[in-house]
Image (cartoon, rainbow, N blue to C red):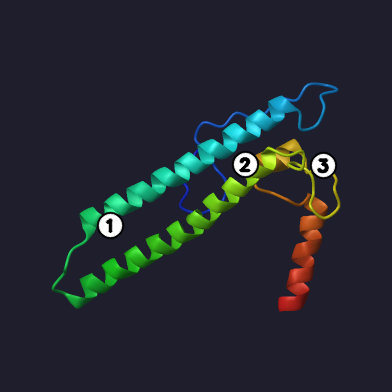
Amino acid sequence: MPGTQSNPSFALRDFSPYQEKDGEEYMNDKQKEHFRSLLLSWKKELMEEVDRTVSHMKDEAANFPDPADRASQEEEFSLELRTRDRERKLIKKIDSTLELLGTDDYGYCDACGVEIGIRRLEARPTATLCVDCKTLAEIKEKQTSG
């Protein structure tokens, strides 16, 4: 899954899916370590992106005499800062998920308690709801806001 973290969806450069074995217990130590490694790598990529943004903004900051050029640069910086803010919130969520991994609650739906599933967690390691509960939550949200 190549990609950068310009949006907060999950994509790691060097990702290897977990290979489940027949009869393997769900959320065993190997699986937990797999997700811990995944989360730490994701967090590292996000932090590197933050560092690149700071460097870019320092390097590119200029006091353009032309108001249109200055406005374009301010808009670009504003968009970058909004993206970094979303990623900052995501880093907090990753930290919370890493704490959850220390308990036996990781990998189980907060709403109904069923297994979220390895593949769903690999797609969204910070997921706290199974697909069914997430779908219901989205339907309810549409009904109340739409």
Q: As displayed, is residue 87 above or below residue 76?
A: above
Which marked residue is nearer to the observer: mark 2 or mark 1? 2
Q: Toward the viewer: 79 or 32?
A: 32
Query: Can residue 125 be spotted in the picture?
Result: no
Name the N-terminal-most of marks 2 and 1: 1
- Mark 2 highlights which residue? 98
Q: Amino acid at mark 1?
A: Met
Image quarter (top left, top right, bottom left or bottom right) of the N terminus: top right
Q: CA distance from mark 3 to mark 1?
A: 43 Å
CB atoms of marks 2 and 1 within 8 Å: no
Name the N-terminal-most of marks 3 and 1: 1
How far across and how far down the image is residue 143, in percent? 78, 75
How far across and how far down the image is residue 77, in percent? 33, 64
Q: Amino acid at mark 3?
A: Glu
How far across and how far down the image is residue 88, in percent? 48, 55
**Horizontal side, residue 115 vs residue 70: left or right:** right
**Residue at left offset 47%, top offset 40%:** 44
- Mark 3 highlights which residue? 115
Q: Residues within 10 Å of mark 3 (few under 14, many from 20)?
A: some
Query: Can residue 118 be spotted in the picture?
Result: yes
Name the N-terminal-most of marks 2 and 3: 2
Q: CA distance from mark 2 to mark 3?
A: 18 Å
Q: Toward the viewer: 85 or 140?
A: 85
Image quarter (top left, top right, bottom left or bottom right) of the C terminus: bottom right
Q: Secondary structure at mark 2?
A: helix
- Mark 1 highlights which residue? 57
**Residue at left offset 68%, top offset 43%:** 100
Please give the label number shown on residue 46. none
